[in-house]
Amino acid sequence: LKADELARLQQQFPQTRFRARIGTRLWLGDHEATEYRGAVLDVTRVSKGDRFGYRQQKTASDGWLVVVAGGTSHGVGLEAPKALHGVMPRAKGVARAGLATVNRNLSPFVWAGKQRWFAEPPHMQVSILFVPSDATEPRVGDELVAHLRHTTTQFDRIVER
């Protein structure tokens, strides 16, 4: 409840004592107050059909394999179960599951205004992304914004801006 809603409840029910739970708002905070980023550690040019990674998958098109700081130990690739209500959220969930069966999973990392695909499942410390050739080539040292859950994210450093 917001402060004004709590005040309204206390006015409506003066015989009842209400105690606000503010912890969630304190530790989750305002999503605009923080921004998670991963630094580009390596960039490798690939052509359609090139093999890469542990399982020697083939690239679907020309582009770059981009190694970004941030892996499962940081909360990348972790997802909590969702309660789905309505046809559209369920359809999107089915579509995501279908894509996952063919190793197509969206990463939380954004480059050139678009959320990018994992090239393979995230590793413990890094993630490997595929950036298609129609996007600007990332350079080592560039930072990619990552959309991550506050509850599962662990960061290496805090930078105040």
Image (cartoon, rainbow, N blue to C red):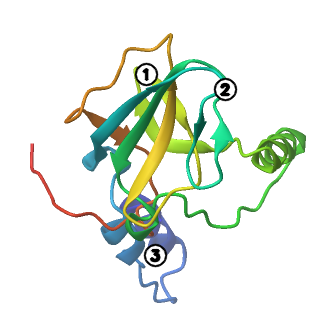
Report whether 21 appears left or right of 144.
right
* Lower position in the chain sequence, tag 3 or tag 2: 3
Q: CA distance from mark 2 to mark 1?
A: 26 Å
Q: Residues within 10 Å of mark 3 (few under 14, many from 20)?
A: some
Residue found at the very far right of the displayed protein: 87
Tell me where residue 158 appears, x and y as whole percent.
15, 58
Mark 1 — residue?
113
Front residue of 161 and 124:
124
Label 2 Cα neighbours within 10 Å, binned few <14 / some 14-19 / many ≥20: few
Kind of residue indicated by mark 2: Gly
Residue beneath the point at 40% across and 20% down: 112
Which residue is the site of mark 2?
A: 49
Residue type of the residue flagged with mark 1: Gly
Q: Quadrant of residue 151?
A: bottom left
Q: Percent from the top left, x then y, of residue 92?
A: 80, 40
Closer to the camera in the image, 138 or 145: 138
| Label at residue 10 | 3
**Whole-number angstrom distance, CA of label 1 to CA of label 3:** 46 Å
In the rendered view, would you say 112 is above or below 107?
Answer: above
- Circle 2 SS class: loop
Who's the residue at 32% across and 44% down the image? 32
**Quick check: 97 above or below 153?**
above
Q: Residue at x 62, y 67 (%)?
A: 80
